Image (spheres, grey):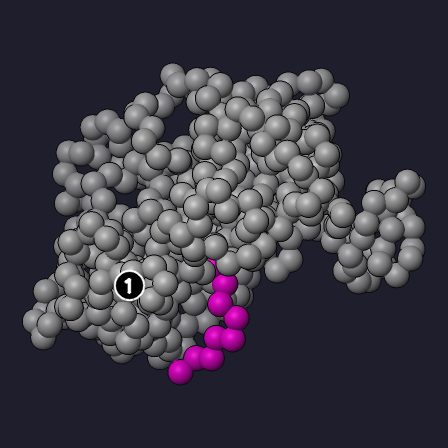
Amino acid sequence: MKRARVAYAGAVHDATPHEDGLQLADGRVLAEDAVVWLPPVEPLGTILALGLNYADHAKELAKELTTSAKDEPLVFLKGPNALIGHRGQTRRPRDATFMHYECELAVVIGRTAKNVPRDAAMAYIAGYTVANDYAIRDYLENYYRPNLRVKNRDGCTALGPWLVEAADVPEPGALELSTRVNGKLVQRGNTRDLVTGIAELIEYLSSFMTLAPGDVILTGTPEGVVDVQPGDEVVCEIEGIGRLVNTIAGDETFGR
Amino acid sequence: MLVNSSRGTIYGTLLNFRGALEALGDAVHQPPLKAPPKAPILYIKPRNTHAGDGDAVALPPGVDALEFGASLALVIGRTACRVAERDALEHVAGYAIVNDVSVPHPSYYRPALRFKCRDGFCPIGPTVPRNAVEDPDALAIEVEVDGKIVQRDHTSTLIRPVAKLLADVTEFMTLAPGDLLMVGVPAGAPRLRAGQRATIRIEQLGELRNHVVHELAEGLS
């Protein structure tokens, strides 16, 4: 089953896919652009994100990496301010010279997980959605890198449109990912190429922190990141999970 | 006491005490750091870390001691986005003492979840309303371990004083009511072994007490 959270006509609703767009829980059928799409995870817990979790992307960034030793997953956290829903707007600051999207499979935790071995890990997943976790490389600093000024900016992590129940995703470890900018294919990958797979990530994280329902793990992005400009439409798609649309907006839109 | 019904996200600020940055010496100019921090470097203490006054903090297997990071935290009272330094404090509802616990780690280069985000690694102490504190940039901080004062510092040595920190942070991210922003941990944070007890005191705020225990074997907790 696929579920979304949308705002429509003065209230927030659960919605499901419909051939004409989407259907609210109360029966109303609406076009995709008639509603405001919210991040589909509610209540939202801790947001964890992986860096350098596709070998090809790590290679792509290799020339700017200060260290190459990779003995454990690179994980960082984000606050709720970073999230926006499907069809949202993300700001590109005027002084940025390299801002890129990152199409990622997002794993949503469904059960409290502590010291979970990888063989049992998949049972702790509620579902999956698509994330587009933007980075503005101009703001990178070598402290807790990637630092929050790069990765925790308001509205820089799009999530949605649907939360797809785990039972409907038989092979989360073999899903095609792609990103298109203004219709042009710029990024492609497959979750089979994750350096640390989904079950291993849950094992690793739950070995030192208790994961709880509503926690979200963004599993990383493959190679193919290019600069995006105000007005660009960025579409991240994951096979069977969804197609997440986002538009880049300039400082003027944000009154800056 | 300030009633804070819904706690939001807890952010920490790295290396915001002059002494803490100086303690790194020339390492800030060497790889992998290469340069001192430019903008505020933040980290998050996620919900599994949140704990309270009197709570035990568990020493993970294979670790000798835990670092207790005494920090003043700003409790956000109003949505703070792009605030100006001069009215930054109007967005603060109050102040809290936070114990930012870490497994000592050798490098600041990569995010330190395994060292800073373990269960119970963020005890939050007494909270006072904003008007109970005359000047947040003039507060003495001390930590006592097993009855002996082991660390003393003062918020007057912050690299970014409170209002400046709020302005610089909210330039790139919005803080929401209920969020906590720790202003930094002073140099020389004490390390505690299992069985040791610490009291963190911040002038005009009160005390936060925690102690270290061995992590219970799986299944016993």
Q: Position of residue A83 (x, y in %)?
A: 60, 47
Q: Residue at x 33, y 28 (%)?
A: A70
The answer to which quarter of the image holds residue B213 is bottom left
The residue nearer to you, when weighing B169 against A255, is B169
* Snapshot quadrant of residue A106: top right
Furthest residue in direction left, as rendered: B148
In the image, taking residue B78 as reference, residue A40 lies left or right, namely right
Q: Is residue B120 above or below residue A138?
A: below
Answer with left or right where residue B218 lies relative to residue A94: left
In the image shown, does A118 or B179 lie closer to the viewer?
A: A118
Name which quarter of the figure residue B79 lies in. Answer: bottom right
Q: Position of residue A98 (x, y in %)?
A: 52, 25
From the image, which quarter does the C terminus of chain A lie in? top right
Going 32% across and 52% down the picture, which residue do you hit?
B116
Residue lying at the far bottom in this picture: please name it: B1
Of residues A121 and B205, the one drawn nearer to the viewer in this rendering: A121
Most common SS among magenta residues: loop
Residue type beneath disc 1: Leu
x and y percentages locating residue B12 in the rendered image: 36, 54
Residue where numbered disc 1 is placed: B216
Is B124 a magenta residue? no
Range covered by the magenta-colored residues: B1-10
Query: Would residue B124 appear left or right of B76 to someone viewing this image?
Result: left
Q: Nearer the viewer, residue A7 or A216?
A: A216
Q: Is residue A76 visible?
A: no
